[in-house]
Image (cartoon, rainbow, N blue to C red):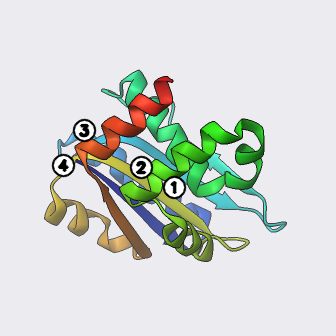
Amino acid sequence: MSELIIIGYDDHATAEAAQARVLQLQKDFVIDLSGLAVVRVDDDGKKHIDTPGSIVGVSATSGALWGMIIGLLFLVPGVGLLVGGAWGALAGLAGKAGINRSLRERVDGLLTPGKSALVVMAKKLTEDKFAAAMAEFGGTVLKTSLSDEAENELAQELKN
């Protein structure tokens, strides 16, 4: 099972500092990352996605799943038009897995011009240590879980 955690912040600097802390938590074995990104919204409302160079232990399959989740959460209108029916099938599977329209709307609500969000996908997480380490940054937390079955279905669909 993977945890998808989105934490909204009022500014980009806080999101970047939180990202640095998550990377340290991975080195300390508090979290086992599948994906990590900072999404910031500029003054014109355009979203920018920044990811660290590489995350140790991320496989090609989990990388593809991570890319699909980022696409569903932040790039849906443009990507949906480009990929058509296949994207719709993935979106349907993701919706059953907990990444549905309601979550996307809540994420959009966090990301108004000038704001940022930290997006974390973790295979394993020591929740109490993670929460304590991240508390100093504050923010609005959205969280959902992806079952192993849902992840496998999404991964299989991505291979097709």
Q: Are marks 2 and 3 in contact (CB under 8 Å)?
A: no
Q: Amino acid at mark 3?
A: Lys
Q: Which residue is mark 4?
A: 30
Please state which of the two labelled residues, at mark 4 or mark 3, is closer to the viewer. Answer: 4
Q: Residues within 10 Å of mark 3 (few under 14, many from 20)?
A: few
Q: Residues within 10 Å of mark 4 (few under 14, many from 20)?
A: some
Q: Which mark is residue 16?
A: 1
Q: Are marks 1 and 2 in contact (CB under 8 Å)?
A: yes
Whole-angstrom CA distance, mark 4 to mark 2, is: 14 Å
Q: Amino acid at mark 1?
A: Glu
Across the whole image, how many numbered discs are drawn on residues?
4
The residue at 22%/47% (across/down) is 1
Residue 134 position (above or below residue 71): below
Give the structural element (helix, strand or loop) at label 2: helix
Q: Amino acid at mark 4?
A: Val
Please state which of the two labelled residues, at mark 4 or mark 2, is closer to the viewer. Answer: 4
Residue 58 position (above or below residue 130): above
Q: Which mark is residue 20?
A: 2
Q: Are marks 4 and 2 in contact (CB under 8 Å)?
A: no
Q: Residues within 10 Å of mark 1 (few under 14, many from 20)?
A: many
Please state which of the two labelled residues, at mark 4 or mark 1, is closer to the viewer. Answer: 4
Q: Which residue is mark 3?
A: 27
Q: Looking at the image, is mark 4 or mark 2 earlier in the sequence?
A: 2
